[in-house]
Image (cartoon, rainbow, N blue to C red):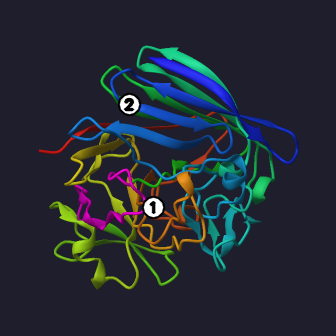
Amino acid sequence: MEIREQPFGKTAHGKQVLLHTLSNGRGLKAGLIDFGASLCSLQWPDRKGQSRDIVLGFDSLDQYVQDQFFIGGTIGRFANRIAKGRFSLDGKEYRLAANNGPNHLHGGVKAFHKVVWTSETVNQAEGSGIRFKYLSRDGEEGYPGNLAVEVTYLFTREGEMVLLYEAVTDQTTPVNLTNHSYFNLTGDPARPVLNHMLHIPSTRIVEVDDQLIPTGNMISAEGTAKDFSNPAAIGSRIGELPSGYDLCYVLDKNEGVLGLAARIWEPETGIQMEIWTTEPGIQFYSGHFLDGTEKGKQDVAYEKYAGLCLETQHFADSPNQAKFPSTLLEPGQKYTQKTIYKFGWAG
């Protein structure tokens, strides 16, 4: 296992941001930056042995500062949407930034993906990697309590990338963390992801309204264009949807138990990725809001469907949905989450 560090630029306030490069010596290589605790590159060889960078990202810190699509970032305090940017705790209403129409999305305007985290190298039984830390102050983006967060990226001997999340608070607060990487297993973001094959071992989804806010119901997707319980090409039925996929699948396992959430592969390169998680849901987003206005690595414009997201998380708007699993973290408790990306080849 090799870990290297180098400068990646400074913020407008003079904070140094480092680029950490991890390599397991067996073809798996990642680039991580302190800004947003972001995954900016992820290399894995195709079936012919050619290394491919399979995530979207940028070449400069300024591009991450300006990015509006959450590319590669750690998302918090609350991933996904909160209706009307508000929730109540113990009779008190908290108001958050309305940064997605009238609703709150991915923690707000200057949320976890837009701040500089501290970082350190870690070596432990499960693997080696980088641990990022951030203290979200009471009132930041409207949330109550001081929340101390750690996100650790580990490479294992088996060629897996493990994400470990931990958080503690001094006041009751909702917490729902995820990573917002966009994957393209061709290694070429100029090629859309519509030929990727996807398997999600679930037929239930969170029902949402036209603003992607949950109704509180979990419904069956069996036999519809939203059903990936049998593997299907992403583009094979996307025309049956108004725009694209932006759905949370309810995983058929107990919360907190590590289980398979998704398997995706690209027929030409043969690259396959499995996602395992302790979270109760996985959000599949097909990248249809990408519009070519942002240029990524090697000056490639990120057009519609240039990458897809598979975000392990709790369900959107949980603070306002009594029937959903709670996302409230109490003082004295510890938030934990584990997500594993396993790489290989299909066929």
| Residue at the disc numbered 1 | 324
Relative depth, front residue between 132 and 302: 302
* Dot label at residue 116: none
Q: How many marks?
A: 2
Relative depth, front residue between 246 and 279: 246
Element assignment for label 2: loop
**Residue beneath the point at 29% across and 77% down:** 238
| Residue at the disc numbered 2 | 28
Depicted 301 relative to depicted 140: above or below: below
x, y percent for residue 326 = 51, 54
Residue type at tag 2 = Leu
304 on left or right of 263 = right
Q: Which quadrant of the rendered structure holds the C terminus?
A: top left
> In this picture, which residue range is highlighted in magenta?
184-204
- Residues packed near mark 2 inside 10 Å, few (<14), some (14 to 19) or many (20 plus): many
x, y percent for residue 55 = 45, 49
Residue 341 shows in this picture: no
Residue type at tag 1 = Phe
Element assignment for label 1: loop
Disc 2 and disc 1: Cα gap in Å? 37 Å
**Residue beneath the point at 25% across and 58% down:** 198
Q: Nearer the viewer, mark 2 or mark 1?
A: 2
Q: Which quadrant of the rendered structure holds the N terminus?
A: top left
52 on left or right of 319 = left
x, y percent for residue 346 = 17, 45
